[in-house]
Structure formats: C-alpha cells, structure tokens
Amino acid sequence: MRLSHFGALVALGSLLASPVLAQTAAPGAASPGAAAKPPMTAPAPAAGAGAAKPMPGTTASTSALIDINTAPKDQLDKLPQIGEARAEAIIKGRPYKAKNELVDKKIIPQNAYDAIKDRIIAHQKS
C-alpha cells in the first residue's frame, strides 16, 4: 500500500514539474549554436485610397461582430449552429435590444447562443 502512495506522489510531482520543464528560453537569450533571429514584426498596412481606418478604442474583434439587427440572412447563416431556418427566425424577431433576447424570445436554444455570443452584437438605432 505504501508503494502505491509513493508512486502517486512521484506521478503528481512529475505533473507539477512538467510546465517548468516545458518552458522555452527567454526571448533575449539564444540557445548555444543557434543564430539570433530578429523579432517578428507585422508589415505596415498600405495606405491606399480605399483603406479604412479603425475607430479609436475599437479592436479587430469588435469590428468583426455581426449585428443581429441588420445582418443579411447569408451572413447569419455562416455563424456556428445557425442554419437557414434559425437565420430566418432571427430576422423575423427583429429588432433586438440586446443579443441575449435571442434566447429570451426563444429564437435559438441556449447552446446555439453560447456558440455565437462572442461573434454577435445588437446595435440600437439612435
């Protein structure tokens, strides 16, 4: 019985130590024999005539949100767990004051809402 306790302690210890062993070297430290690489940088976007500037305070994730009050059927249909029928139901239930009204009004089930809640928004007309 004591041997099984010892084995369990060894297994637990190795699980706790594995993240430490899996860490890589610091970004500034190069491994022996490896050539130092310059840090990765994103290329500057081209400033074309049709280039849109992002609004201050918004991120790419907020600009990519789909507005359930104005999105066309084909855009809603591309969301996970939303097919043609649910897209039609979302359109018929408009306007929405908040995105959680999709579940409150029983337009879509909770599991479908959980799959899309980070991808949608319900803008209000002002």
Image (cartoon, rainbow, N blue to C red):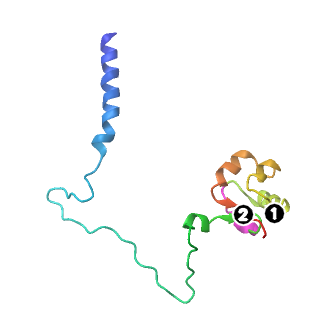
Amino acid type of disc 1? Ile
Q: Find the magenta span and give its range.
A: 72-80
Q: Is residue 22 left or right of residue 117?
A: left
User: Horizontal and vertical percent for residue 82?
Assistant: 72, 56
User: Horizontal and vertical percent for residue 28?
Assistant: 24, 59
Kindly identify the residue that appears in the image at 76 percent across and 69 percent down. Answer: 70
Which residue bears the numbered disc 1?
Answer: 91
Amino acid type of disc 2? Leu
User: Horizontal and vertical percent for residue 96?
Assistant: 80, 59
Front residue (pair 13, 78): 13
Q: CA distance from mark 1 to mark 2?
A: 9 Å
Is label 2 in a helix, a strand or a loop? Answer: helix
Q: Is residue 63 left or right of residue 41?
A: right
Which residue bears the numbered disc 2?
Answer: 76
Query: Badge 2 local density, few (<14 within 10 Å), some, or many (20+)?
Result: many
Disc 1 to disc 2: CB gap under 8 Å: yes
Check the image and name the residue furthest to the bottom.
49
Q: Is residue 45 magenta?
A: no
Kindly identify the residue that appears in the image at 78 percent across and 52 percent down. Answer: 101
Front residue (pair 109, 64): 64
Check the image and name the residue furthest to the top.
1
Say whether disc 1 or disc 2 marks the residue closer to the N-terminus.
2
